[in-house]
Image (spheres, helix red, strand yellow):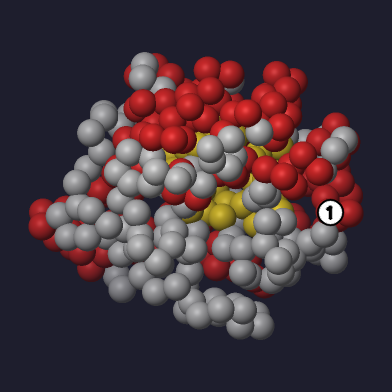
Amino acid sequence: MTAVTIEAALRAQESRRDPVPNSSGTEAPKFRVPADACDCHHHIYDARFPFTPPAAPLLPGARVMDYRLLQRRIGTTRNIVVTPAPYPASFSDNLVTLDAVGQFGTSARGVAIVSPAITDAELKALGDGGIRGIRFSLALKNAATAMDDIEPLSRRVDALGWHVQFNMTADQIVRAGDLWKRIPCPIVFDHMGHMPQPVGINHPAFKLIRRLLDKGKTWVKLSVTYDSSKVGPPTYSDLNEVGQAYVRAAPERMLWGSNWPHPNETNKPDDALLFDLLAGWAPHEATRYRILVKNPEKLYGFA
């Protein structure tokens, strides 16, 4: 599809308020989204880059042009493409992310999934393609890497100025023990650390992450509120205490992410409604500007 055709599709969607693929609802967020706002966590699935070997069916409606429709709806302009967890951890399996970052251009960066077998030359090629971190999805039964791989890989990417990102359950975060003290580079916790409800901020993982935030090199993604909520839409009110507590603790190291196309959700959430939750967790416009614009600039190296 040509750039002219893509732009025409974007204009048509905006004028009709058609549903965005893999997202329910059609309305825009209720708060004013600042210029250069960044969605720090989403995925791209593209049939030109199939799973190797096939691990699951490719999620339809999750290409770059589909995500641009979401951007047009919610008002973000920068984005972080995260290689989906089902992809194996080889260089070739990050090509879908490298291609997406290339299509988005200077408004995007990427986070890759790698294994200890990756070469220095391949890491350099990822960096040249806009990758700025690696992700460990240890919450999955078929995790591509093991706990013992984390520290050696973190030292390799620290030399590149990258960070390490973790998708782990709250219990796994606690069981990791003093691993967090041994990681030299910045640490990013996905999805608010998966704090289970109704325990929330009383879970030991929250207290651990809170201490790491105080040390100055840990970041938290305020994303996937539907992940642990018992209340669910439209309010997700049981998660408000967690989101608010994180923002109060370290607004200078909070990030926001959509997790579009919501790969584990059969009933896709309303992305604008999820975005609006941030206004309750960070009621001051200056704080939201920091979370949506300044913090991503610092972590991901946007100009």
The amino acid sitting under disc 1 is Met
Q: Could you tell me residue 251's position as x and y percent? A: 53, 21
> Which residue ends up furthest to the front in the rendered image?
198
How many numbered marks does the figure carry? 1
Q: Closer to the camera, 219 or 123? A: 219
Q: Residue 116's quadrant in the figure?
A: bottom right
Q: Could you tell me residue 39's position as x and y percent? A: 44, 43
Answer left or right for 204 relative to 65.
Answer: right
Residue at image x 46%, y 35%?
239
Secondary element under disc 1, as helix, strand or loop, is helix
Q: Closer to the camera, 151 or 69? A: 151
Residue at image x 85%, y 32%?
181
* Residue carrying label 1: 147
Q: Is residue 185 visible?
A: yes
Residue at image x 29%, y 70%?
2
Q: Is residue 119 visible?
A: no
279 is higher (above) or lower (below) than 27:
above
Quarter placement of the N terminus: bottom left
Residue at image x 53%, y 38%?
198
For label 1, count other residues whose C-alpha is less than 10 Å away and answer few (under 14), some (14-19) or many (20+).
few
Q: Could you tell me residue 192's position as x and y percent? A: 57, 38
56 is higher (above) or lower (below) than 221:
below
Q: Closer to the camera, 119 or 59? A: 59
Answer left or right for 101 relative to 24.
Answer: right
Q: Could you tell me residue 178's position as x and y percent? A: 87, 35
Q: Closer to the camera, 241 or 256? A: 241
Answer left or right for 57 relative to 162.
Answer: left
> Which residue ends up furthest to the bottom in the rendered image?
53
